[in-house]
C-alpha cells in the first residue's frame, strides 16, 4: 500500500480513536476510510477490528486508571462481551442483516433524541432498573454479539444500556462502555484473524494512532464530563444513522 494511503488511514484512526473514546462511533470514520483505500470489505472489517482493539483498550485503561471503572468488578461482563463478540464475528456472512440495516437508523436517531432532549442527564448516577446479573446475562451478549456481526453504533447502545438500565452517570457509562467495547472487539478480532485475514501492518499502524487519539479523547471526557460527551454522542449517533440511510438509498 502506498505511503499516502497509509498516512490517510493513520489520520483516520487517530480521529476515530478520539471520537470513539468519548461517545463511540469511531468505526464510522475508520471503516469507510479502509474501503476508500481500496481494501476488500471483509478484510477491511477484519483490519478495523485490529485498530479498534488498541483504541478501545487505551481508552478503557485511561478511565480505569482515573478510577471511573473497576476492571476486577467488571470482569464477568467483559468475559461475556469477549465471547459474544467472537460469536457475532463467526456468524458474519451467515445471517441476513438487511432487516437490521433498516431498523438501525431509527434506533440510532432515537438514541440521539434521548440524549439531546432527556432532562437531568449528568455525571451523577441514576436509578438502577436492572440487576448486574440481569444486565450481564441479557443486555451485554446482545450488544457485543451485534458488534462482532455488524458493528456501527455499539458504543451508543452500550451507553444507553448503562444509563437507562444500570443507572450510571454519563461519564461512568462512557468508561464502562469502553471496557466492554474492547472485550467485544478482542473477541471478534480473534475470529476475524482466522477467517478474515486482516492487514496486520496497516491495522497495527492505525492502532498506534487510535491509541493516541483515545488517550486524548478520554482525558478530555474526564475533564469536562457530560458537557462534551452528550453533544458528541448526539452528533455521532445522528451521523451513523445518516450514513446507514445513505447506504440503503
Image (tube, grey):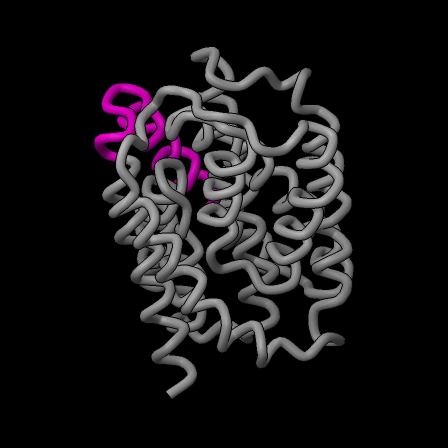
Give the camera-side residue of 231 and 135. 135
Image quarter in which the N terminus is found: bottom left
Q: Residue at x 50, y 28 (%)?
A: 167
Q: Is residue 220 magenta?
A: yes
Residue 131: give x, y in percent of width and height.
67, 28
- The magenta region covers 207-228
Give the camera-side residue of 39 and 142. 142
Q: Is residue 59 magenta?
A: no
Vertical order, 234 against 229 (above or below): below
Q: Residue at x 37, y 20 (%)?
A: 124
Query: On the picture, is 24 further left or further right than 39?
Result: left
Query: On the picture, is 178 further left or further right than 37?
Result: right
Q: Residue at x 26, y 37 (%)?
A: 119
Image quarter in which the C terminus is found: bottom left
> How many numbered circles are shown?
0
From the image, give the main secondary structure of the stretch colored magenta: helix
Locate residue 136: give its quadrant.
top right
Residue 57: give x, y in percent of width and height.
54, 33
Vertical order, 122 against 189 (above or below): above
Q: Residue at x 23, y 34 (%)?
A: 228
Residue 241: give x, y in percent of width and height.
37, 66
Vertical order, 76 against 204 (above or below): above
Vertical order, 151 against 62 (above or below): below
Give the camera-side residue of 103 and 217. 103
Residue 109: give x, y in percent of width and height.
35, 61
Locate residue 3: give its quadrant.
bottom left
Amino acid at each position: 500500500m502506498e505511503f499516502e494511503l497509509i498516512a490517510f488511514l493513520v489520520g483516520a484512526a487517530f480521529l476515530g480513536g478520539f471520537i470513539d473514546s468519548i461517545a463511540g462511533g469511531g468505526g464510522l470514520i475508520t471503516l469507510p476510510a479502509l474501503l476508500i483505500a481500496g481494501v476488500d470489505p471483509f478484510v477491511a472489517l477484519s483490519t478495523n477490528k485490529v485498530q479498534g482493539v488498541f483504541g478501545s483498550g487505551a481508552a478503557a485503561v485511561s478511565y480505569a486508571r482515573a478510577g471511573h471503572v473497576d476492571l476486577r468488578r467488571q470482569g464477568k461482563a467483559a468475559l461475556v462481551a469477549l465471547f459474544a463478540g467472537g460469536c457475532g464475528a463467526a456468524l458474519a456472512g451467515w445471517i441476513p442483516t438487511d432487516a437490521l440495516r433498516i431498523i438501525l437508523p431509527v434506533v440510532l436517531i432515537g438514541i440521539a433524541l434521548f440524549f439531546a432532549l432527556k432532562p437531568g442527564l449528568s455525571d451523577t448516577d441514576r436509578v438502577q432498573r436492572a440487576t448486574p446479573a440481569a444486565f450481564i446475562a441479557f443486555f451485554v451478549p446482545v450488544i457485543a454479539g451485534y458488534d462482532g456481526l455488524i458493528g456501527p453504533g455499539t458504543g451508543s447502545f452500550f451507553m444507553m444500556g448503562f444509563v437507562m438500565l444500570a443507572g450510571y452517570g454519563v461519564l461512568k457509562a462512557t468508561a464502562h462502555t469502553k471496557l466492554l467495547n474492547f472485550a467485544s472487539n478482542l473477541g471478534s478480532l480473534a475470529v476475524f484473524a482466522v477467517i478474515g485475514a486482516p492487514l496486520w501492518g496497516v491495522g497495527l499502524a492505525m492502532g498506534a494512532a487510535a491509541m493516541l487519539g483515545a488517550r486524548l479523547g478520554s482525558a478530555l471526557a474526564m475533564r469536562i464530563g457530560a458537557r462534551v460527551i452528550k453533544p458528541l454522542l448526539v452528533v455521532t449517533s445522528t451521523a451513523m444513522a445518516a450514513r446507514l440511510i445513505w447506504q440503503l438509498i
